[in-house]
Amino acid sequence: KTQSNIEQSQIHHQCIGGILFYQCCRSHFKIKMTLFLADPMALSRRRRSNAAFIGVIMLSISRAAFSSTAASQLAGRKRLTIDTISDNLKSMEYAVRGKIAIEADRINQELSKQNEGTSTSDAKFPFDHIVLTNIGNPHAVQQKAITWPRQVMALLQLPDAIGIDHPNASQMFPEDALQRAREMKHSLGGSGIGAYTHSKGVRQFRQDVAQFIEQRDGADPGSVDIEKIFLTAGASEAITMIMTSLIKDSNCGIMTPIPQYPLYSATLDLLGGHGVGYYLDENAGWGMNIEELERSLASAKAKGINVVGMVLINPGNPTGQVLSSDEVKDIVMFCARHNLVLMSDEVYQENVYREEDTFFSCRQAADELGLIKDDAIQLCSFHSVSKGVFGECGQRGGYVEMVGIDDEVNDILFKLASSKLCSCASGQAMVSLMCRGPKPGDVSYESHEEEKRVTFEGLRDRAMLVSKGLDSIPGFSCQPATGAMYCFPSVEMPPSVIKASEEQGISPDTLYALDLLQTTGICVVPASGFGQREGRFGFRTTFLSKESQSVVDKIRDHFETFCSKY
């Protein structure tokens, strides 16, 4: 099992081969003499065939002997094992698809087998399906796709002869969908969405993003630089790209909220950087204050961490809060004052449910404060088609728009994007459709806006239903979900639950979430996966499912039996 042993084995097999070759040569000589005596002319005819025959035999014997022994000695010498794999990758945790989601998938497969009659397990479950409230994946829980974008996407996918150029196309698709599909195919160079695009994304699609930002923020036309916009595979890829550029070495750190979306902590683990947590104030509706930011930053610097950036999630995930314009401006000024790159996660900007709240972007705050004009802020803003009312998670479309980033840095990011060739062309197209829908007067405008309104109001109503329902459960406390797609209640755990979880080597809210799943079929994410204050326990749940009222009722009943059990 060592290199020297293998070398000795090779020599050993060469010796065996030499002995066998000697014996075969003696036999071959006897054959030749016999043939010569019987028929001298036969020797010349058979000499080459016999030599070739013996050579083949020798090669086969030698290779077989070496291969069998070498293979046995090489067994168990795999290069990539759990011991040799990257330590950063091993330590990375992503709770949204972690232990509870894996168990939910296992149960779901078993339920499918039972329904098909192919199960070999004796397991019985007191439910017939899994309710996936662990992840913001709207279409997986029966949210209806918005029609007009899908019509345009269908035309982009179809060959022209049976799509935009079909003689009956106008009978199958509205005229504004046909017109937009033609325009987008032209922007794609006539090759459609089956070809690679520019590594930053299709130029016209990036122009749609730029105009969307200008109109949203009341910015001057042409003030958003499309060369500082990258279209990516969801916002997640853009976030990873920026974090990769920020973490120069293991001494670098990025400020992240507690609680936070696990993508940030997972990426920092993978890159070998430091997470510098700052706490949101649960008693103030998960609000932020500058004193906590200053405390967190000073504490990290005292430990020798080079803090290079800060993450803001607004509206909040998993906390569901919406920040005021003054709060956003305070955060922007904090980052400018301390020379931190501000990473503004704004994927839930359409998901603002209270009439008194308005989404206020970090870019608009920086613009109004004069920081963009003075080149005094570095800001990266992210958006996605996965949330809002589109909910097109599987399309993998998103973008990052950058302010104050030098051209030399932009070129390096372009190189990084180029190494992946481009993001999914269909995802890019969906970003364009999200940013620029039908305009007033178009045949699809009213129906498009109506579908968006119905979807939004359903989300708004369920946000109130779930947050109030959870807050009414004895032992639960849940802040109002005024934005995003989640509730993040705290749960008072019986002391015996804490003891039992310690014995099992898991967190108390993981034990609770497993019990909830196995008893009711409801899949939530333990709050420990997002970060929380010491001694707090809870979970994150979406309010996307049409079964939300039933989910609240089952959680209420389960908690009573759970507490009795412990």
Image (cartoon, helix red, strand yellow):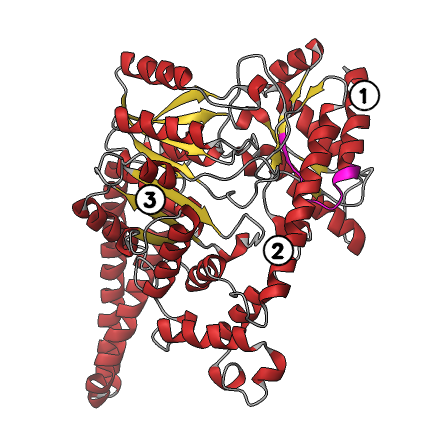
Label 1 environment density (alpha carbons within 10 Å; few <14, some 14–19, many ≥20): few
Mark 2 or 1: in front is 2
Task: Give the residue type that dot 3 points to.
Answer: Met
Task: Give the residue type that dot 2 points to.
Answer: Lys
Return the disc, 3 or 1, that comes first in the chain's sequence: 3
Secondary structure at numbered mark 2: helix
- Direction from residue 363 to residue 473 in the image, left or right: right
Tell me what residue is drawn at x 48 percent, y 29 percent: 260
Label 2 environment density (alpha carbons within 10 Å; few <14, some 14–19, many ≥20): some
Return the disc, 2 or 1, that comes first in the chain's sequence: 2
Above/below status of 370 relative to 14: above
Above/below status of 349 relative to 562: below
- Image coordinates of residue 451 in percent, x first then y, are 65, 58
- Image coordinates of residue 323 in percent, x first then y, are 49, 31
- The residue identified by callout 2 is 452
**Which residues lie in the magenta part?**
540-550
- The residue identified by callout 1 is 560
| Quarter containing the C terminus | top right
Q: Is residue 548 a member of the stretch shown in magenta? A: yes
- Direction from residue 408 to residue 264 in the image, left or right: right
Q: Is residue 440 a member of the stretch shown in magenta? A: no
- The residue identified by callout 3 is 241
